[in-house]
Amino acid sequence: MVQKRIGRPPEVAPQPAGEAPAARKRGRPRAFAAEVALGRALDTFRDSGFAATTLDDLSAAMGINRPSLYGAFGDKRELFLKAYARYREEAEARFAPVFEPQRSLREALELLFATALDFYLEGDNGPRGCFTVMTAGSEAMTDAEIRATVQRAISGTDKALTGLFSAAVARGELTADSDVPALVQLVGSTIHTIALRARARFPRAELEAITRRTVDLACAGALRDA
């Protein structure tokens, strides 16, 4: 019987004295998409408002722990401001078709209010209303930065509506003596009231009735200088 030679095991280079084995790098990849997490934070703030939303609520909704939340978005107030900026971007994108120049005044206003109602009545946990209106009556009262942000949003809406009515005057849809600032206030006030009523869960049919009367009044040019 021929005995097979057993090979010697490979030699392991000795570790130099005083040196520990090289540690394996444990870089932990970010386990969440920042934009998705921010969208979930926005949903949470829109549902409950700033004061009633806790960091635990945000952490659970965003699917990240508190250290990761702080690292990516800062504290609760910073996250709120980022979420509100995200809301404004979404709102501007949704309302942009209203202000396309080929639309008549009536078409634009009807689309404006239909879009607003769709926006304000949506929500997995019930109608959310308008985040700007909601914030104006809460955090904007005591926080100067949030107040300035809300004022810019409302002023931006006023500016867009002023352009809409001025174009209608230029096209002859409204008389030259139409009170454009008053018409802007009329439509802006209606936007605010349907936002509040949507949040309070008034039926859509009632809100649509309010918007129809506003559109009829605005298109009739009923608000003019005496």
Image (spheres, grey):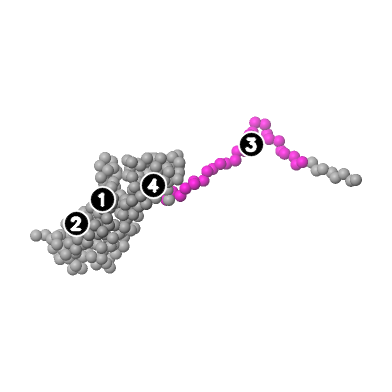
* Disc ID at residue 186: 2
Q: Which mark is residue 41?
A: 4
Which residues fall within the magenta stretch? 9-35
Q: Quadrant of residue 99?
A: bottom left
Q: Which residue is mark 3?
A: 21
* Amino acid beneath label 4: Ala
- Does the magenta portion include 216? no
Q: Do the numbered discs 4 and 3 sit on residues whose CB atoms are within 8 Å?
A: no
Q: Position of residue 96 (x, y in %)?
A: 31, 60
Task: From the viewer's perspective, tell me whether residue 28 is left or right of residue 161.
Answer: right
Q: Quadrant of residue 146?
A: top left
The residues tagged by marks 2 and 4 sit, at their Cα atoms, a distance apart of 33 Å
Residue 196: image tag: 1
Outermost residue, top side: 18
Quote the CA–CA distance across marks 4 and 3: 43 Å
CB under 8 Å between discs 2 and 3: no
Residue 28 belongs to the span the image colors magenta: yes
Could you tell which of marks 1 and 4 lies nearer the N-terminus?
Answer: 4
